Amino acid sequence: MNAKYFNPPSSLFARNRQKFVESMAPGGMAVFHSNDEVPRNGDAYFSFRQQSDIYYLTGIDQEDTILVLFPDCPNPLYREMVFVKETSEQIAIWDGARLNPNQVFEVSGISKVFWYHEFWKTIHAAFLLADIIYLNLNENDRFTDKVSYANLRFAQEIKAKYPLHQLKRSAPILANLRMRKEAQEIDQLKEAIAITKKGFERLLGFVKPGVWEYEIEAELIHEFVRNRSRGFAFDPIIASGKSACVLHYIENNKQCKDGDLLLLDFGAEYGNYNGDLSRCIPVNGKFSPRQKEVYNAVLFVQREAKKLLKPGVSLPVYHEEVCKIMSEELIKLGLLTAAEVKANPKAHLKYYMHGTSHHLGLDVHDVMHRWENLDVNNVVTVEPGIYIPEEGLGIRIENDVVITPSGVIDLMDGFPIEVDEIESLMNR
């Protein structure tokens, strides 16, 4: 029901809810809130982006949404219900109509639909029938909250209103479920990745000495939006020359010079799912011998890393193995000596200081159990890099792959990646 992207069928979200309730303890009731609309300045708000868990469970992509799951409730009314923002002619005139109850059912498969402002007067009786309340906080281990958010405020409210109830966490269940993608989710990811490819191929005919990094960013957003993407999956990194050695460089305000290498790390978002691509291309269309040497070393590490990914392997253990391969390449490049590596197994951190892979899905750094073994239909990135500040050279190559019983399928197979391939496309 979104004018820009095509939603998966409601059966996907019904199946996701069923998987969640099967993981709940008897007598449990779970409540999920949409993201807040975040004030910008004056009467303006930042562009709304749905809270990933509630989208995963409902497919509803609008503010002021609350999902309630209470599968054991003796009153059938409360077993599965959703509260949404009331739509009206006035709202339709000013902001565009919100989903009506019939549309909510079409999107989510949920038939018990109430208005958002009716939540407390409707739900109080349900809480009295529950023994356990599942609350949904952001437990991504990279996250530090500086501002409050709807699910956190609700947790504090529940603890005050119902201090004798047992509280449980939804996040571990959802991480377990969201790590294992359904076929329709992989289809959404493939669409985000296909749009990402169109953006990259557009750049290969655009980049040349003298262009500005922000002009390259503009080419990408043009290609994304015209292909039904909301826009960037994350702030893009368009880093020429020595800026490529800043891992999270997002200023994108430098002019690309003849002889520079340009590190690109970006992705398109499609229907709340995200692509994530990294490539390095020569601004003048021709790799120097040293640039080619370092690029091919990173490409070799990436290909060896993909061979290590399979069910039963944990990302931390896998990353250790990748770092051993990387150390050998750093020795060949003359950046480290064998003696240095033998004396200090972490010597590679001087030139390769980030992880090799992260989960990908509704979030770019998708939820996961970091120490749990990989499983079939996990989707992860593979992104080794080498950063040599003294040479003003930073190279990262990243593809998105899905784990299969026997290894991986590279969802970016066919993207330009070889030195000769990139040079040929840039010099057409």
Image: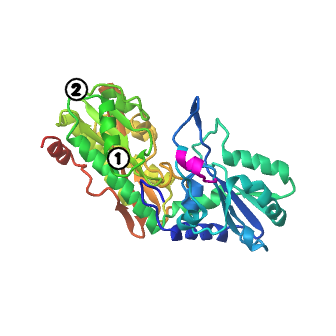
Q: Is residue 266 left or right of residue 142?
A: left
Q: Position of residue 396 (x, y in %)?
A: 34, 41
Q: Is residue 32 left or right of residue 106?
A: right
Q: Is residue 331 above or below residue 400?
A: above
Residue 91 covered by magenta stretch: yes
Which residue is at the front of the view, 271 or 29?
Answer: 271
Magenta segment main secondary structure: helix
Residue 32's tag is: none
CB contact under 8 Å: marks 2 and 1: no
Q: Residues within 10 Å of mark 1 (few under 14, many from 20)?
A: many
Residue 377 covered by magenta stretch: no
Which residue is at the front of the view, 225 or 424?
Answer: 225
Q: Residues within 10 Å of mark 2 (few under 14, many from 20)?
A: few
- Give the quarter of the image for residue 143: top right
Instruction: Tally the numbered discs.
Output: 2
Quadrant in which the C terminus is drawn: top left
- Give the quarter of the image for residue 112: bottom right
Q: Which residues are magenta?
A: 86-93
Q: Is residue 364 left or right of residue 118?
A: left
Type of residue at label 2?
A: Gly
Of callouts 2 and 1, which one flags the residue occurring earlier in the amino acid sequence? 2
Which residue is under mark 1?
A: 224
Which residue is at the front of the view, 383 or 31?
Answer: 31
Residue 210's tag is: 2
Q: Is residue 263 above or below residue 25?
A: above
Residue 395 shows up from this direction:
no
Q: Position of residue 3 (x, y in %)?
A: 43, 55
